[in-house]
Image: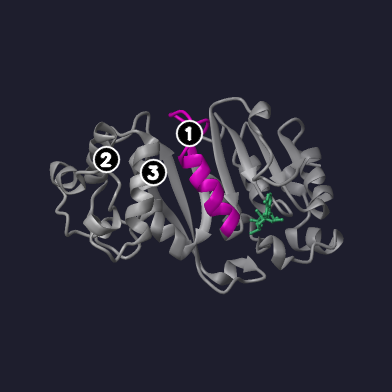
Amino acid sequence: MELKDLPPLRDVIADHGLSAKKSLGQNFLLDLNLTAKIARQVGDLAGHDVLEIGPGPGGLTRGLLIEGARKVLAIEKDARCLPALDQIAAAAPGRLQVIEGDALLVDPLAHLTPPIAVAANLPYNVGTELLVRWLTPAIWPPFWDSLTLMFQKEVAERIVAAPGSKAYGRLAVLAQWRCEARIVLHLPPTAFTPPPKVSSAVVHLRALAAPRFAAEPKVLEAVVARAFNQRRKMLRAALKGLVPDLEDALLVAGIAPTERAEQVSLEQFCALAREVAARR
Ligand code: SAM
């Protein structure tokens, strides 16, 4: 059987008894036109191995394969989904490998050949945790060229937010420091089965070869975490004790000590991280 001849996802779900489990954040995409559209947001699929997290019954997996991914490595926690995924693997010989496991614990890298793209429609908590890990690897550039990820709309907006907006915070700084980040698709709750309570959006992040502004990653991460932990406080209070001469470090970085984290640009955060590193 070829990919295009596989049964509709609604039938797959019925045949394999894949009633959605809330505990696994299961909201499935059943419209193959939509999953193909999401797959196309990845970019150059034919030239990439794709790491897919949480394939479920395989709607996005099919989209990725039909749109030409060189290989898909899919990590799925729910063993009930494996027979449906095996059926897809049989229709795309040698191009789909499935690992049963928790994506937070499995190391997929041994099974992938660069260049690598990541694509996922994941539960909110797992997605955010993985995103932060992918954005803060030990070395840069990371193992992936791009991330194409579904999030709740509100989380997607936090990733692409600009300074001065309520959504701007740690996620925006981490994402935009070394990536180009864009929302590429908006999806209403009705796109999913069962429909979640909130709207969703697909974010595409492309890794830049080098950071936009120089800074030590660990120092920048610590400064940004502290600054936004108390986002309503002025930075001279929120960052108190970070370095002995904090107000001077802020001024050298071009930041008024009375400013709040929300107003500070990426460039200013990086300048502050350099000052902090130099004064420690
Ligand atoms: N990609 C499918 C789709 O778009 O229809 C399923 C999306 S559903 C929102 C999330 C999927 O992630 C489910 O299949 C769920 O079992 C799986 N999942 C949840 N937590 C996981 C984890 N920690 N590791 C791997 N898969 C996980």
The residue sitting at 37% across, 29% down in the picture is: 209
Circle 3 packing at 10 Å, graded few (<14), some (14-19), many (20+), is some
The amino acid pointed to by label 3 is: Glu
* Residue 60 image point, x, y percent: 64, 50
Mark 1 or mark 3, which is nearer to you? 3
The amino acid pointed to by label 2 is: Cys
Circle 2 packing at 10 Å, graded few (<14), some (14-19), many (20+), is many
Q: Please name whichever residue, 12 or 256, is drawn nearer the observer in this view of the structure.
A: 256
Residue holding disc 3: 221
* Residue 57 image point, x, y percent: 74, 54
Q: Is residue 245 left or right of residue 177?
A: left
Circle 1 packing at 10 Å, graded few (<14), some (14-19), many (20+), is some
How many numbered circles are shown?
Answer: 3
Magenta segment: 125-146
Residue holding disc 1: 145
Label annotation for residue 270: 2
